[in-house]
Image (cartoon, grey):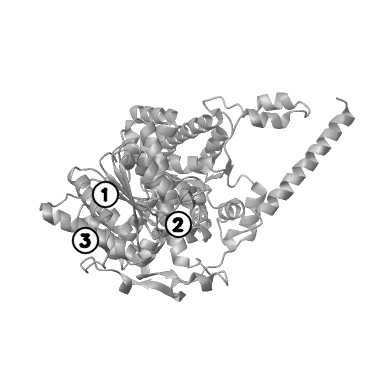
């Protein structure tokens, strides 16, 4: 290929790239950070505490012999220690049925609650203000639908904080409701009561379907991780469903689809889940509901019928479909269950759903091992060879999970420090931007980008896969300009971070004392932008530890010793991140 041909090919490539960039820019022109919210106190709500149905009230008239059989099967399942999994859509909460569900949990009947995202929004708002459910028909006209500030901000913060602690979606919300004094009406919250009782509450979210996805502080990657953790917990319950009961109330898509996938996984892994009861509750009337439908029958396309009532029970279970309004069917089911318990003169024990606290160290390591087995070996070696640092292992793992999640989703790790810590920041960036302990050839699909370019193959074979890392303060022209022009001292790190960072990125600040003012200002800026802040420091932690999300405090006070221990810690952290990267590019 001559010079003319090479220039022609490069010119074509540039044109192609310009076209791609142009199309990409058109895709990212919507800026969610500009979305306007308003105080929830200004919103008129359609559902209040006055609409709550008292569990002691007589149930409305309703006759369906199948309902009695379902109630009996629920009681029998619980007598035998089998699970009762209650899946629901948002109208159950909006219909004022929360107290009945809470009563069934407290009496040991329901052992697991599952829901879509909308359920938790209404439940969360009831716990916060004692009201929920806006007038959608009016608010959609002016773009204020779903824009209440407190709902979007607090729920997103709760989920983001919970995920950092190893919790799933449901218990992340339960934790905030339980610990934040602003939730004056928490006793009416199903999420809170499940959290308090240690009963799993798993939330199964479809991105873009909930109003909190409209909020500027929404991090979709975190939502995915939170609901993914809940799905694993849900599958664990389904794997024990032999002899148990699965109930679905008004969830026409998420409920049946999530259940079917969980059942398939459980059976794939060798769990016996054959003889169990399913029941679907909805307004939709279906005659002869156990009959198989052909594709010319509209009922064939009703997911709960196929994926709850018929298909899952084909190996010996029994499925039911109950037609009726939730405000009628659920109170009647509640009364029938309590009547049956009274007839048998039995009191059920509360289910052992597990601790709602942060997962234990062993649980966290096991979760990591399932995706990144080499990381577990690195952690084990670190604990074996550095027993004086075992006190910081949980925080090291927490930092690893935050940074690795950032890299998994295309984010950037920003580093900052002063003096020796500044040198450490560069040291870390060097270990992550190229091979550290493992070979990191770039993936084959990326090598193809170099095909046809001058020395393209040589360059492609010589490059190594890296992680996106940037050391604040490396741009000396910027740093000197900020320090010269800004009347507030020590703003250079914060200014650079503000200009470059995006929500979902991570700031790792290194300060042996934890009191470095420029690191503190950078941390505050990071918090404002929606970044996770990690601090690597000494024994006392200092002022930066008061605002950091994760703090690794090595057990030393003398500066040189702190720096020596920092080297051990960040080398291990780099090795863990590299092992995770290699696992991803290997696949």
Query: Distance from label 1 to label 2 (Cα)?
Result: 26 Å
Q: Nearer the viewer, mark 2 or mark 3?
A: 3
Residue 479 locus on image (x, y percent): 62, 51
In the foreground, 298 or 248: 298
Of mark 1 and mark 2, the one earlier in the sequence is: 1
Badge 2 element = helix
Query: Distance from label 1 to label 3 (Cα)?
Result: 18 Å
Q: Which residue is mark 2?
A: 156
Residue 111 image label: 1
Of mark 2 and mark 3, the one earlier in the sequence is: 2
Q: In this rendering, would 375 be left or right of 446?
A: left
- Residue at the spot 51% in from the left edge and 40% down from the top edge: 420
In the foreground, 147 or 485: 147
Badge 1 element = loop
Q: Nearer the viewer, mark 1 or mark 3?
A: 3
Q: Which residue is mark 3?
A: 335
Q: Nearer the viewer, mark 1 or mark 2?
A: 1
Residue 77 locus on image (x, y percent): 22, 45
- Residue at the spot 23% in from the left edge and 49% down from the top edge: 74
Residue 309 locus on image (x, y percent): 37, 47
Query: Distance from label 2 to label 3 (Cα)?
Result: 37 Å
Q: Quick one: quadrant of the N terminus?
A: top right
């Amino acid at each position: 290929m001559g010079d003319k041909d090479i220039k022609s090919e490069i010119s074509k490539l540039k044109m192609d790239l310009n076209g791609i960039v142009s199309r990409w820019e058109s895709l990212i022109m919507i800026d969610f950070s500009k979305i306007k919210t308003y105080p929830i106190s200004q919103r008129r709500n359609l559902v209040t505490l006055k609409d709550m149905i008292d569990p002691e009230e007589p149930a409305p008239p309703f006759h369906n012999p199948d309902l009695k059989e379902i109630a009996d099967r629920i009681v029998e399942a619980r007598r035998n220690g089998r699970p009762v999994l209650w899946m629901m859509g948002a109208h159950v909460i909006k219909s004022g049925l929360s107290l009945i569900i809470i009563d069934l949990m407290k009496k040991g009947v329901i052992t697991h609650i599952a829901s879509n995202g909308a359920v938790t929004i209404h439940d969360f708002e009831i716990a916060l203000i004692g009201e929920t459910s806006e007038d959608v028909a009016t608010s959609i006209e002016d773009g204020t639908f779903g824009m209440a500030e407190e709902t979007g901000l607090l729920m997103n913060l709760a989920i983001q904080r919970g995920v950092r602690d190893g919790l799933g979606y449901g218990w992340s919300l339960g934790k905030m409701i339980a610990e934040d004094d602003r939730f004056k009406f928490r006793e009416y919250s199903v999420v809170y009561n499940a959290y308090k009782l240690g009963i799993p509450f798993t939330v199964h979210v479809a991105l873009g379907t909930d109003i909190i996805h409209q909020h500027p502080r929404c991090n979709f990657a975190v939502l995915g991780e939170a609901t993914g953790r809940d799905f694993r917990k849900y599958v664990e319950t389904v794997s024990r469903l032999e002899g148990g009961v699965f109930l679905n109330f008004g969830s026409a898509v998420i409920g049946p689809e999530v259940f079917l996938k969980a059942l398939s996984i459980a059976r794939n892994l060798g769990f016996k889940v054959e003889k169990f009861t399913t029941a679907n509750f909805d307004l939709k009337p279906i005659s002869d509901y156990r009959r198989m439908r052909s594709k010319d029958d509209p009922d064939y396309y009703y997911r709960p019928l196929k994926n709850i009532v018929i298909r899952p029970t084909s190996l010996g279970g029994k499925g039911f479909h109950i037609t009726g309004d939730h405000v009628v069917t659920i109170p009647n089911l509640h009364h029938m269950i309590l009547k049956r318990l009274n007839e048998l003169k039995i009191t059920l024990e509360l289910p052992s759903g597990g601790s709602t606290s942060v997962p234990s160290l062993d649980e966290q390591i096991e979760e990591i091992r399932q995706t990144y087995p080499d990381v577990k070996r690195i952690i084990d070696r670190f604990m074996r060879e550095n027993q004086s640092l075992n006190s910081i292992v949980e925080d090291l793992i927490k930092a690893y999970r935050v940074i690795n999640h950032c890299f998994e989703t295309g984010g950037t790790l920003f580093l900052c420090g002063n003096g020796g810590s500044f040198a450490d920041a560069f040291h870390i960036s060097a270990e992550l931007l190229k091979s550290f302990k493992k070979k990191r050839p770039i993936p084959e699909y990326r090598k193809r980008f170099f095909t046809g370019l001058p020395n393209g193959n040589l360059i492609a074979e010589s490059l190594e896969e890296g992680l996106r890392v940037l050391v604040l303060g490396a741009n000396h022209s910027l740093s000197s300009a900020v320090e010269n022009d800004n009347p507030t001292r020590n703003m250079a790190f914060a200014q650079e971070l503000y200009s470059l960072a995006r929500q979902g990125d991570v700031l790792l600040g290194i300060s042996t004392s934890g009191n470095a003012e420029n690191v503190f200002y950078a941390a505050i800026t990071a918090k404002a932008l929606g970044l996770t802040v990690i601090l690597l420091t000494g024994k006392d932690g200092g002022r930066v530890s008061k605002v950091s999300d994760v703090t690794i405090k090595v057990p030393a006070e003398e500066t040189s010793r702190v720096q020596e221990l920092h080297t051990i810690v960040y080398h291990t952290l780099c090795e863990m991140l590299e092992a995770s990267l290699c696992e991803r590019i290997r696949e």
